[in-house]
Amino acid sequence: MKLSKKLFSAVLAAGLVVGAASVSNATNGYYMIATGAKSLGMAGAVVANPQDASTILQNPAGIAWLKGTTFDIGGAAFSPRRKLNGHDSDSKLYVIPAAGFAMNPMGCNCGTPHFVFGVGMYGDSGMGVDFANSNLAGEQGALTKAWSNMAMMELAIGGAYRVNDQLSVGFSPVLVYQSMGLEMNFDKSRMYDQDGNSMGEGIYKLSMDSVSAYGIGFNIGAVYKINDMVQLGFVYKSKRYMQKLEWNTTPDGFMIGDDKVKMRLNMPRQVAFGINVRPIKPLKIEADVRWINYNNVMDEVDIDGMNTMKKWPFHWKNQWAFALGAEYAATDALTLRAGINYGKSPIKDKDVNSNVIAPAIVETHVAAGASYKISKNLELSFAYVHAFEHEESHKNTDPMSQMMYGPETKVKMYQDTAAVQITYNF
C-alpha cells in the first residue's frame, strides 16, 4: 500500500469518526455534563435530585418527584475555543435547544402510588471545528483545512411510577437524531509517495456534505429516599443503536472506491449513581459518579466504500466522570446552585492525531446557576459553566504523521456555556 494512500486513510479516519462524535456542550467526552439550566448549574450532579422535566433524559424515575405538571423550555449558548498547532478554529459559537414536559396527576410530591408521564427533547451535541491556514500543520504538513459540523438530539417519551413515599422507578425509550458534515483540504506539493516523488501541485479537497441518521435506545432509573436527609439515584442509559451515516461520493480510484461512503456511529451506554444529602433544610448537596462505555463504540469503527481502510481507529478509552453540586434555597423565590465536574479525557496523547478534527479533551468544569420565581407558577433559571483549558500533544516520528502534522501535533481546548430556562408549573 502506498504511503500517500495510508496517509489519506488515516486523515479521513480522524475526520469522520471524531468530527462526528466529539461535538457537544460542556462535555464529558462528547456527552453534555447535563441538560437544562438547572442541571447545568449543578454541574450535572442531579441523578438523585430531580430538578425539572429534563430528568426524563437524566433519570426518568425523577419525574415522579416533581409537583404538578411541569413545562420547561430553554437553550444554551456554547463557545468551545480550540487550537490546532497554535491556530484557532473560526467556529466559536453554537446554540443548543432544550424542552421538556412532565405531567403528575397527583399534583404533589407525595407517596401515593401513581404514574407520571414525561417528554423531553434536548440537544446532546452541537459543535465542530473550522481550522484553515496554509501552515495549519507547519511548513511541511499537508493539511490546510479541517472543517466539521455535527449535531445530535435525543427525544425521550416515557414515564415513572411512584411506588410509595420512598421509591420511584422510571423508563423512557429514546429516539436519536444525528447529523454530520466534513471537509478536509491537503496541499499536494507537500505530499509524496513511497518513492519520494511529489504528488504535484494544487489542493486535494475531501468534502462530505451534512447527512443524517436516526437511532434508538432507552433509559431506566430509580430514586430512593432513605430519610428526609438522604436520597439515592441510579440510571442506566443503553447503547444508542444508529443507522449508518451515508455520503454520496465520486470514486477516484485512489482512496474512495464506491459511489457511497457509509459509517455507523453508535452512542455508548452509561451507568450513573448519585447520593443527595440535605444537612439543613435549605441546602442540598449531591455527589454523582458516571461510567461511559466509549471503548465499545469509539475504539475502531467500520467504514464501507474506502479502498484502503475498513476500520477507523481512534481508540477512545472508557471514562469515569465525577460531579459534585450544591443547591441552596436563599429565599422562597431565589435558589442558588454551584458545582464541579471532572472526567479524564478519553483520548490519549498517542492518539491525538486521530482526534484533531474535534478534540474532546476538556476534563474539569465549574458551574454556577440560579433560579428565581417570578410568580407562583413561573420560574426563570440561569447557568454558566466553564471548562478549563486542557492540552494534549504527540511527537510525530513516523513519515506519515510528519508529512501530515509536522514534528509535533498539539491541540488545546477550553469551553464556556451560558444557559437560560423558563419553567412553568401548573
Image: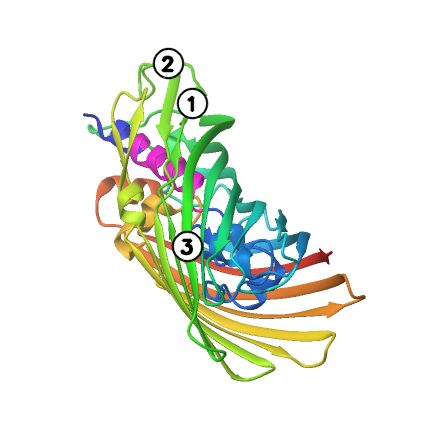
Q: Quadrant of the C terminus?
A: bottom right
Find the magenta span and give its range: 8-22
Q: CA distance from mark 1 to mark 2?
A: 14 Å
Camera-side residue of 416 and 65: 65
The reply to whether the magenta stretch includes residue 245 is no
Q: In the visual, does 399 lie left or right of 38?
A: left
Image point (51%, 57%), residue name: 113
Residue at 60% x, 51% y is: 92
Query: From this viewpoint, is residue 59 visible?
Result: no
Question: Disc 2 designates what residue?
Answer: 251
Residue 255 is situated, as x and y percent measured from the top left of the image, at 31, 22
Q: Amino acid at mark 2?
A: Pro
Give the Cα separation between the discs numbered 2 and 3: 47 Å
**What residue is at 36 percent from the left and 39 percent from the top?**
14
Q: Is residue 72 left or right of residue 146?
A: right
Residue 21 highlighted magenta (yes or no): yes
Looking at the rendered structure, the secondary structure element under dot 3 is strand
Instruction: Give the amino acid at mark 3.
Output: Gly
Q: Nearer the viewer, mark 2 or mark 3?
A: 3
Q: Is residue 111 above or below residue 180?
A: below
> Considering only order in the chain, which callout, 3 or 2, is on the residue closer to the N terminus?
3
Q: Where residue 374 appears, x then y in whole percent?
A: 80, 66
Residue on which the image places disc 1: 246
Element class at badge 2: loop
Q: How far separated are the C-alphas under marks 3 and 1? A: 34 Å
The image position of residue 325, as x and y in percent, is 50, 73
Q: Residue at x 63, y 52 (%)?
A: 105
Residue 79: quarter of image = bottom right
Which is nearer the N-term, disc 1 or disc 2?
A: 1
Q: Position of residue 19 (x, y in %)?
A: 44, 40
